[in-house]
Amino acid sequence: MFEEGKIPNDQHSFGGSWTCIKLEALEKYLAAFNTALSKQSFTRIYIDGFAGTGRCDITMNGEKTSVDGSARRALAVNPPFNKFCFIELDAKKMAALKSLQAEYPEKSIDIIQDDANAALKEICKNYNWKNTRAVLFLDPYGLHVEWSTLEAIAATKAIDVWYLFPYSGLYRQTAKNANALDADKENSITRILGTDEWRKEFYKPQRQADLFGDESGDEREANHHDMLNYVSKRLKGLFPAVTGPKILFQAGDSKKPSGAPLFALYFAASNPSPKAFGLATKIAKDVLNAL
Ligand SMILES: C[S@@+](CC[C@H](N)C(=O)[O-])C[C@H]1O[C@@H](n2cnc3c(N)ncnc32)[C@H](O)[C@@H]1O
């Protein structure tokens, strides 16, 4: 299929034990989603906002291993999706994604090289969501998903989302003393939370002035849990149903995690019909509980 020596390099080194947990959750949900909708006439689409290469080269508990990434897992799921949209910003990963098209010539696969926010807003605007249902995987490395993108997704009323929220990315940006927050940090947090009210929620004026009687700036009173509760509150205000989050840690496995909490895996349904989001949420909860 490819000229010798020109096989696309799908090596993609990142992640750890949390990578397997999130991929397992996604894969189980995709199979259950397609089974649940298989008797209905909807076109079913899988959208990968941060598609990578289809492969993950991870280091787990000190050992290097390679597992199928989200794109490959979605392509292999049975019953199958009718269509796939893989979005990826990095030009170097395009060859690997295009090789998936060649490997699955019978499948309808769109590969979009763009920023996920821009591409997703276009997809949300252009599809006919009356007869289409989708599962979207948002799997960024960091604080990349804009709130306005989540708003566009929720407005389709037809997309189920698995969102790997960058928990440690958020708490790393929120310095203990507000004087250490620069405009870039503040803007990035506002962009992912969709409001600047987090500043008042997380920070309070220091009770004591410093030794010289100067005001020494606001101090963060919210701890990691408080911040994550705030994220959950924001998501619950936007989507009709939100499940999780399941916190994913640096090491260990799902039952015995260890190390720092890195990500928070959320499921959100955008369909406001209680029957639809009730079923989606039940499946998502079962998936998360079985991890
Ligand atoms: C954690 S990896 C995704 C892994 C993939 N879901 C998998 O399971 O194989 C994040 C990916 O997002 C890509 N990326 C980074 N910023 C992006 C952006 N703004 N829009 C789209 N893709 C982006 C990176 O190049 C990287 O491949």
Image (cartoon, grey):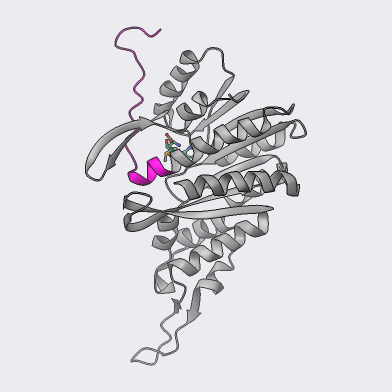
Q: Nearer the viewer, residue 77 or 141?
A: 77
From the viewer's perspective, is 114 left or right of 151? left
Magenta span: 1-21
The image shows residue 202 at horizontal and vertical percentages of: 50, 72
The N terminus lies in quadrant: top left
Residue 164 seen by the camera: no
Up the image or down, 280 lies above or below 43; here it is: below
Residue 17's place in the image compared with 212, above or below, is above
How far across and down, in percent of the image, does residue 186 sit? 49, 62
- Dominant secondary structure of the magenta stretch? loop
Instruction: Reply yes or no: does residue 19 show up in magenta.
Output: yes
Q: Quadrant of residue 172?
A: bottom left
Residue 168: x and y, percent?
A: 40, 57
Q: Residue at the location (64% across, 39% down)?
A: 121
**Total number of numbered discs in the rendering:** 0
Quarter, ligand 1:
top left
**Image location (x, y in percent) of residue 46:** 58, 31
Q: Answer above or below: position of 161 versus 264.
A: above
